Structures are given as C-alpha cells and as structure tokens.
Amino acid sequence: MKTFAQLSIIVVLSAAAAGATYLVRGAPSRRLVCDPTTLKRDEVCLDTIKDRSSYLWVDARLRKDWLATGLPGSILWNLDGAEDMQAFEAETATRLMETPRVIVYCGDENCGVSRQVADRIRLLGLAEEIHVLRGGWRALKEAGLTRNSSPGT
Amino acid sequence: MKFALGLWMAFSSLSLAGGLDFPETSKVVHAPADAKTVSIEFSFSNQTAKPVTIEKTDGGCSCMSIQIVGEKMNYAPGESGVVRANFDMGNFSGEVDKGIMIWLKGDAAENPSIRLKIHVEIPVVVKVEPKTLKWEVGGQPESRTFQITMEEKKPVRILSVVASNPLFTYELKTLEEGKRYEIKVTPSSTSAPALAIFHIKTDCEIDKHRDVQAFASIRKTSPGEKATAR
C-alpha cells in the first residue's frame, strides 16, 4: 500500500511539473525551426536569404499545389510522371539566363523532390547558385509569403 | 521509495519501447529503364511483449505510395508483416533516394518510430554530354560539341535534331550507328546573350527516353563564376 501511495505521489508531482511547464512556457511550438548548423551542403534557411527577389524560385510540388499556393513569381518543376520534363527544362533554362540563382522548395522538410529537382537544374549548367529551401513550402507559409499568392504574378 | 521509483521508470521505459523490428531498414533497387513503377518490400515483426499498432505511413511525395500488406495494422507479440513501397518512377532518372516514415500508436506527429530508406538507380538511356554548351559574351564563336551516347544494349538512332535559335548552326555526325553521335554547334556571333534549345528525337522504344534536350548559351560570366565553356 505504501508503494502505491509513493507511486501516486510521483505521478502527481510529474503531472504538476508538466502542467506548470505548459502554463509557463505554453504549448509545444509546432513552428518550423531552421538550425543553420544542421543544414545539408546545398540547403538554406529562409531567414538567411537577404534579397529574395534576386532568386529564381522553383516549386517542386504538384501542379495543383503550385497553382493554388505557389510563391508569386515561382516556376514549376516537379517529377510527376504526367508532366512534361522538357518543358520544365526549357522554361528553367530560359529563366536562368536572366536570374542564375535558384532556390527550390517542395512541401516540407520530409519531401525529397526538391533535391532531385535541384540536381537536374545543376545538370543544366546554367545556374550560378542552387539551393534547397529547408522546410520547403511550409517555411514560406509560416513566413506569410504564400498567403493569397498566385504564381506567375 | 526506491521500489516505487524503479516501478515508475520501468513503466515509462516499457511505454517507449513499443516498436517493430525491421531486419533491413534500407534497400538498393536497380530499376529497369522501361519500368513505370517499382515495388520494394520491407518485412518486420513485433519483437516486443505487447501489441503494436501502425497508425499511419508517409512516402514523402506523391510518387511513393505505402501499403501495409493485407492492410493489417495491429500486430500481437511475435506477429510479422510486410510494408510495401510502390515508387512511381514518373520522370525520375539517375539515382534517387526516398524515405518512408511509419508512425506507431503513441508517436508524436513530428517523430515517427520508423524511418526506412530506398535508393533507386534508374538508367539513363540517351546520355548527352555536356547538357549545355557555353560561350561567353564577346568570346570567340568557335565550335563546340555535344557527345551523345546510347546506354541501351539495343541500338538507338537519332532521327532528328532541331534548334530553337537560328543564331546557332549545327551538324549531326554519326560516330557509331545506334551507339555514339556528336552534334557540332557554332554560334554566328557572341555579341549578346542568347539561348538555344536542341530537341533531339530518337527511335528509342521507351517513351520517356525517346526525346532529349540539350542547350547552348551565350552569356556573361559573373565575377565569381569560373568559365566552363567547352
């Protein structure tokens, strides 16, 4: 009986500590955190990009997502089998002549398509810089950059 | 008190230990050039002393669908199952790395218990090197060459080459019928930036490898950029 009483005290104390933490610090943050020390070689944090307009932004999500919530001015290049890869290549090459710095983003940090697309853009040999955005579209959304956006504007 | 603490810690660790055992957590797949999809299976078993429930799976992109074979989501101790990943190769080529995440009951949304890796190697049938021929603005308008190699066992022939910009003249040369070709490209001038897209049509039997593109560009080299014209 004594053991159960002690166990109950431990449980109550743990719950109280958890509750106090919640009250003091609030609910756990679900916001994306970009730690520069954990970036892969070609990744970039959104808040370290100084002049966003000097980059060609490439959306690696599905066409419907790009049309609905793509970054203004972005172009589409995904690996969907229904898409025309040659059209993506041609448009990107044309745009790179004017804007040779590229940032590719896909849905979130778990989406690997942006790196594949970045590799393909790298193969074109026309870009001076190619980065993959850590956190992808989620990072752009949290920064308020995709709200009411429509690509190509 | 020590006993109570011990009991508490044992209970806590037991609640975290619930999981599935995967003998292999990463696989390498060599996909055929004409494959539209590849399926990769991972077997697993519940080596814990309590039932485990798979709550959800994620293949990271629309190109990867994940199935739990038999749609069985609950596994009693000792039971085993199979996770099948169906990779829609779409327009992927070369080497592709994909990840699969599996959440078990009780996992935090951002921290699935299980992460599996797949490395898919997809052959390139018509290889063009370099992808882009480059000239610098104001540079010598000398000829440069695309080398085209057919990586299939069966011969693949070039049927036509069309350039999008008349500033560039070109000449197709067969080095070995069905195997090796070259296209010699010459700009008439390098006085201003320009881009040409070369559409190369082949008789490859595999749709997605039939047509390829290459580029020729004349542009200013930025101060930090090394001249890479070939």
Image: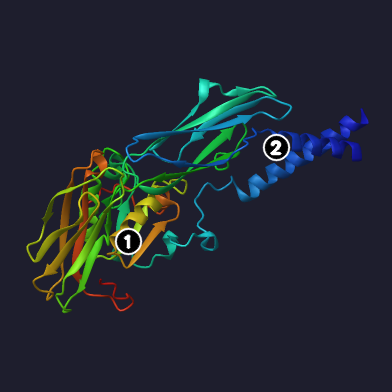
On the same chain: label 2 and label 1? no
* Labels 2 & 1 near each other (Cβ < 8 A): no
**Which residue lies at the image location 62% right of the left edge and 50% below the top edge?**
A25
| B95 w.r.t. A82: above or below | below
Kindly identify which numbered label has been placed on residue B91: none
**Which residue lies at the image location 70% right of the left edge and 37% below the top edge?**
B16
Q: State the image quarter where residue B102 is shown.
A: top right
Q: Chain of mark 2?
A: B
Amino acid identity at mark 1: Val
Would you say B86 lies left or right of B180 here? right
Q: Chain of mark 1?
A: A
Q: State the image quarter where residue A104 is shown.
A: bottom left
Can you identify the residue that label 1 sits on? Answer: A102
In whole angstroms, how far apart are the C-alphas of marks 2 and 1? 42 Å
Would you say B225 lies left or right of A139 here? left
Is there any visible trace of residue B1 in the rendered image? no
Q: Position of residue A61 (x, y in %)?
A: 34, 45
Residue closer to the observer: B116 or B152: B152
Q: Secondary structure at mark 1?
A: strand
**Which residue lies at the image location 75% right of the left edge and 38% below the top edge?**
B13
| B44 w.r.t. B156: above or below | above
Amino acid identity at mark 2: Leu
Q: Position of residue A37 (x, y in %)?
A: 54, 63
Q: Secondary structure at mark 2?
A: helix
| Quarter of the image that includes the N terminus of chain A | top right
Can you identify the residue that label 2 sits on? Answer: B16
Is there any visible trace of residue A28 in the rendered image? yes
Q: Residues within 10 Å of mark 1 (few under 14, many from 20)?
A: many
Q: Position of residue B203 (x, y in %)?
A: 19, 43
